[in-house]
Image (tube, rainbow, N blue to C red):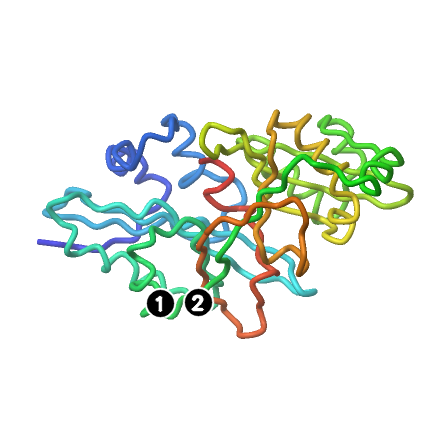
């Protein structure tokens, strides 16, 4: 008999064997547990949906819940992750997605890493494009950008960020400091810009993938300073930015496909209001 269940934090031990087979991303047991089952900012009564056959888990879809302040108000988010079903029961895969949509109407649901072949399934469930491209920023400074960088500074030291960040950004830093992400605080004059990035790879080239940009105008005005700070924090040669966070023209950048999907809880939540924090991207 096939059964669908909500699973809580106490279900990790029985779900973990499924996660081990999800892919060779080098994640440890502790990383899986922290990403999907014991994250400290949890805003929800459960951690995902499990598909069971005769009492044994054969499928799983993780739900990473959070509350964020966007557009001047608090909104609820669910970033889904790790949609996996064993080979024998793949025909029941969509059962894991249906309750995600039906039971969470007050949440904006985000899929940062959908598999291309499943995009049609998501579309039928009411998801719309969040992103289509990433920009890989090349380390080629223009003269003006290089001169602006000389007038700025940056730090990735935890004690500095703890001291200089405030409000929601200080909360972000404290929430996610245990994950695989890297932090940098840019300064120029009286302005600041807080960045959060993870380390990725493109054909074995290290890439700093931006998950959060505190002041986008500052970031683009001080791109050389930002790329220098991220290189120091991560050792990456390139910086990746989702296209929705950029202006119409970005020089010295390579465009690559990067589909992301979401189902907004309200029609006035635009794609550029949603970043990569509080999602699987922080731990993968």
Above-or-below relation of 263 to 61? below
Task: Identify the disc placed on residue 190.
Answer: none
Residue 266 pos. (x, y %): 53, 72
Image position of 166 (left or right of 134) = right
Which image quadrant is residue 174 in? top right
Q: Nearer the viewer, residue 92 or 23?
A: 23
Residue name at image x 67 percent, y 65 percent: 71
Residue 29 image position (x, y, % from top left): 36, 27
Query: Between 224 and 184, which is closer to the camera in this rendering?
Result: 224
Quadrant location of the C terminus?
A: top left
Q: Mark 2, residues whose alpha carbon is within 10 Å: few (<14), some, or many (≥20)?
A: some
Q: Is residue 151 above or below residue 190?
A: above
Residue 53 in the figure: left or right of residue 207: left
Question: Helix or strand or loop: what does disc 2 sit on?
Answer: strand
Residue that numbered label 1 is attached to: 123
Separation of marks 1 and 2 at Cα, in angstroms: 6 Å
Question: Mark 1 and 2 residues: CB-CB less than 8 Å, in contact?
Answer: yes
Instruction: Name the residue: 41% across, 41% down.
Output: 36
Q: Using the image, tell me which numbered label, if any, was put on residue 128.
A: 2
| Mark with earlier residue (1, 2) | 1
Q: Position of residue 102 (x, y in %)?
A: 34, 68
How dense is the environment of label 1, judged by Cα within 10 Å: few (below 14), some, or many (20 and up)? some
């Amino acid at each position: 008999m096939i059964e669908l269940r909500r699973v809580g934090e106490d279900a990790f031990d029985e779900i973990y064997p499924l996660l081990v087979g999800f892919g060779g991303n080098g994640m440890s047991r502790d990383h899986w547990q922290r990403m999907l089952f014991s994250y400290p900012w949890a805003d929800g009564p459960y951690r995902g949906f499990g598909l069971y056959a005769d009492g044994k888990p054969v499928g799983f879809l993780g739900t990473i819940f959070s509350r964020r302040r966007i557009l001047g108000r608090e909104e609820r988010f669910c970033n889904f992750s790790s949609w996996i079903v064993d080979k024998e029961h793949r025909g029941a895969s969509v059962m894991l997605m249906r309750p995600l949509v039906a039971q969470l109407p007050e949440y904006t649901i985000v899929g940062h890493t959908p598999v291309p072949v499943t995009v049609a399934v998501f579309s039928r469930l009411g998801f719309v494009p969040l992103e289509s491209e990433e920009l890989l920023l090349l380390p080629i400074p223009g003269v003006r950008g290089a001169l602006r960088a000389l007038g700025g500074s940056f730090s990735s030291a935890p004690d500095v960020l703890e001291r200089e960040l405030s409000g929601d950004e200080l909360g972000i830093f404290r929430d996610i400091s245990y994950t695989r992400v890297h932090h940098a605080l840019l300064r120029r004059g009286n302005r600041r810009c807080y960045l959060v990035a993870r380390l990725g790879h493109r054909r074995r080239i290290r890439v700093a993938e931006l998950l959060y940009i505190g002041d986008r105008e500052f970031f683009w005005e001080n791109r050389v300073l930002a790329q220098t700070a991220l290189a120091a924090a991560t050792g990456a040669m390139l910086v990746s930015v989702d296209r929705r966070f950029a202006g119409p023209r970005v020089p010295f950048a390579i465009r690559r496909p990067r589909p992301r999907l979401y189902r907004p809880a309200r029609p006035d939540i635009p794609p550029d209001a949603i970043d990569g924090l509080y999602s699987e991207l922080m731990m993968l």
